[in-house]
Amino acid sequence: MLITKFLQITTPLVTQEAASESSITLIDLIQKGGFIMVPIFLLSAITVYIFAERFLTIKSATKNSDNLLVSIKNAIKNGDLAGAKNAALSSKSAIGNVLLKGIAKIGQPIKTIEASMEATGKLEVMKLEKNLGILGIIAAIAPMLGFVGTISGVIKIFYNISLADNISIGLIAGGLYEKMVTSAAGLIVGMLAHIAYHFLHILLDNVIHTMESASLELVETVSE
């Protein structure tokens, strides 16, 4: 009777201890991915940096665009071109630079004003697109690196089997870990880079639309 009670008490403790020893952390998984995890990790860091930097830059391109446009339009209607220029300069934004170029051409034909703002707008968009292509490259390369890790893991499995001349879970576990971890990591990083690339392009499209609308309103104000 006492032995039975002792076993009932100790068995859950032993099971719990074994489960805790068999658990694996995220760091352990990354380490099991092998050397391929190093470039994958670097690509993930680059992805995060470019996304954060470009997100803040693109969002600032049209900051306070509505208030800026109202101030410029009111200044132009009152004949205060200097005030309109100062408002555009003080905005320190891409849309402010586009409008500033148009204000500087006031007095010339409307087509000249439009062409000047359009050219400036293209330059500003090119600046905002800086490094976005890198995200597209990462989206393509990261899964490929994961595939390289898969091949490396398979090679390791067969190499261990050839050395031991038998098959066991212990022999193939290391290669399987490397194969699965690198594949998953490469796909995740590639997916994140792909999402970041297209999300930033959506924001950029909104910036372009805002620039075009502001340019049209400035031309209409000048025409009046």
Image (cartoon, rainbow, N blue to C red):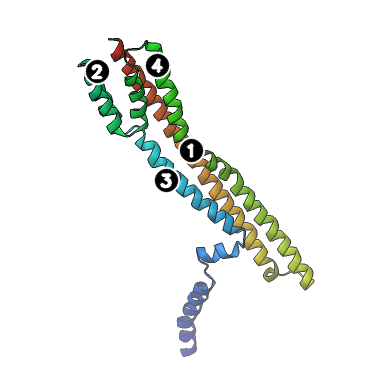
Q: Earlier in the sequence, mark 4 or mark 3?
A: 3
Residue reaching furthest bottom? 2
Q: CA distance from mark 3 to mark 1?
A: 13 Å
Q: Nearer the viewer, mark 4 or mark 3?
A: 4
* Foreground pick, 167 / 180: 180
Residue placed most toward the observer, 139 or 68:
68
- Of callouts 3 and 1, the N-terminal one: 3
Q: Secondary structure at mark 1?
A: loop
| Above-or-below relation of 201 to 22 | above
Q: Amino acid at mark 3?
A: Ala
Amino acid type of the residue tagged 4 in the rendering: Glu
Instruction: Relative to 27, say whether 89 is above or below.
Output: above
Q: Secondary structure at mark 4?
A: helix
The numbered dot on residue 114 is 4
133 lies left or right of 214? right
Q: Residue at x 40, y 12 (%)?
A: 111
Q: Is the C-beta separation of discs 3 and 2 under 8 Å?
A: no
| Amino acid bearing label 1 | Lys
Quadrant in the picture for the C terminus:
top left
Q: Which amino acid type corresponds to the residue marked 2 in the rendered image? A: Ile
- Please provide percent x and percent y for residue 167: 75, 69
Q: Position of residue 143 (x, y in %)?
A: 61, 48
